[in-house]
Image: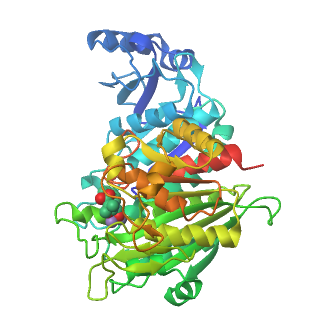
Amino acid sequence: MSSALKLTIANLDEAFGDVLVVLVGKDGKLGPEAAKRLGKAGAARIAAAAEAESFAGKSGATLSLPAETGFREKTTHLVLVGTETAESQKADFLKLGGQIQAKLPKGRHASILAAGPDGPIGPDAVAGMALGMKLAAYRFDRYQTQKKGDDAEAPGASAVTLLAENAAAARRELKTQDAIFSGVTLARDLVNEPPNILTPTEFASRAAALEKLGVEIDILDEKALKKLGMRALLGVGQGSEQESRVVIMKWLGAKDEKAQPVAFIGKGVVFDTGGISIKPAQGMEDMKGDMAGAAAVVGLMHALAARKAKANVIGAIGLVENMPDGNAQRPGDIVTSMSGQTIEIINTDAEGRLVLADVLWHVKQKYNPKFMINLATLTGAIMVALGQEHAGLFSNNDDLAGNLLKAGTATGEKLWRMPLGPEYDKIIDSKFADVKNSGGRYGGAITAAQFLQRFVDGCPWAHLDIAGTAMSSPSTDINKSWGSGFGVRLLDRLVAENYEG
Ligand code: BES
Ligand code: MN
Ligand code: ZN
């Protein structure tokens, strides 16, 4: 559940609220709009305060001041925000929005003069700043019954008005950004939900709610999955009381409804105990987030449908719970995947790849997409390799990988390309079956990717290992939540830049 931020966009000459945020340049230098609105006295006061506090106007640095009496009827606080190094890029304004949100006093009406030291800020940047503020204000407080409203940890003003040069255009752009915001919020909510609530069936019904946005939903239950032969996926869920599900979401927004779609596939292990190869107790609660790939796919489908993206997009998620009961899968078991390839189970904790193997194969056979991109909290090894700043990118297609890397840089959801190759692939050959589900510790993220590649049937494909970026990631300017919603903005951008219109 998000604490919603009430945000509006008005013209530059609109009256100020209780709090006024002014973007300033080097050493607190005011731009022309701010100089005009604040007058000589205001400008002198700001220059003096900047000097006294040695405020250099570095990007993101802030200085809060009481507004002197008579300065402006209503305004009681000024917040100076440095923009010295802000380039005219959306990612920077997104960040700036988050930084501003954190500095606004609670319960007040804040106005932000969306004009920098060099003049007004364009509509895209204004909307980007608004998105940054909203993302920063998100808190998951659904289960905190004692801490609500004023007590809640969420910072920020009760209402924010962005004063912009071309308010109408900025408002139009904000509509798009709001669609993306609700997609990210949905993904974060799903990742943050506890695993007793968010079972595979509950997850499926949350995904089914996208129907109201015009997304076609197909929920495959265990009977349907058996019929399709998804025994790799079903094997993971067989030690749980909870039934497994696969959900297929279809958004047909292209001019031609029959045009070849693109496809996004998500790992949705609603809780990963490790199964019989059980995980240590320490930190196991984090494994409620092992469905972050599926959450990102649902959030992405929401964003695309809400902004009526002109593309045909398939979203597919494999939903299972990995538990160790008397019926659970064992190390040594051999299962036959939907593709016909047999898999030797070495470690029941390498379950995500088993789920994805069948969903990838199914999507390729049924929808023949232009490409498949899967998202998964797949390995601890990717965190050893990349930490929590980049998600691992594995791909059999350089164009797709290039587009993804570009979208990553543009959105700040950064990717780092990792290698694939026959030498790595050999490691997962099995003594008893066609392939084994673990290649051991060395190159663990890579051998996991090699496993997936055996199930894409030559389709252009990319795998994003988001174990380090989707949950429990360090707090940033635009994310204070345990579940980050990583992947929604990235893939929305990928579609917008390459597959629409
Ligand atoms: N869900 C985990 C990976 C994970 C670890 C995600 C930490 C987020 C945080 C995955 O199912 C797993 O257990 N992977 C094993 C694979 C191994 C048994 C081959 C791992 O990474 O240790
Ligand atoms: Mn596991
Ligand atoms: Zn897992």
Total numbered labels placed on residues in the image: 0
Colour setup of the view: rainbow
For image coordinates 41% across by 79% down, the residue present is: 334
The correct choice, above or below, for 489 with respect to 1 in the image is above
In this view, the residue farthest toward the bottom is 223
Up-down relation of residue 69 to residue 392 (above or below): above
Name above or below for residue 54 compared with residue 183.
above
Rendered image quadrant of residue 114: top right
Tell me if 9 is positioned left or right of 386 in this view. right
Q: Quadrant of residue 277?
A: bottom left
Q: Residue at x 51, y 15 (%)?
A: 35
Foreground residue among 405 and 307: 405
Q: Which quadrant of the view contains residue 282?
A: bottom left
Q: Is residue 403 left or right of residue 322?
A: right
Say which of 243 and 122 sits in front. 243
Say which residue appears at 41% left-offset and 56% top-offset.
Answer: 427
Q: For the view shown, which residue lies furthest in the front direction?
A: 431
Can residue 426 be seen in this snapshot? yes
Residue 155 shows in the view? no
63 above or below 323?
Answer: above
Residue 20 relative to residue 113: left or right: left
| Residue 383 percent coordinates (x, y) | 33, 47
* Residue 448 position within the rendered picture, expressed as x and y whole percent measured from the top left: 42, 58
Q: Position of residue 195 (x, y in %)?
A: 32, 72
Q: What residue is at 34 percent from the left and 43 percent from the top?
A: 385
Question: Regarding ligand 2, which quadrant of the image does it lie in?
Answer: bottom left
Of residues 411 and 85, the one drawn nearer to the viewer in this rendering: 411
The image quadrant where one finds the N terminus is bottom left
* Residue 391 x %, y %: 43, 46
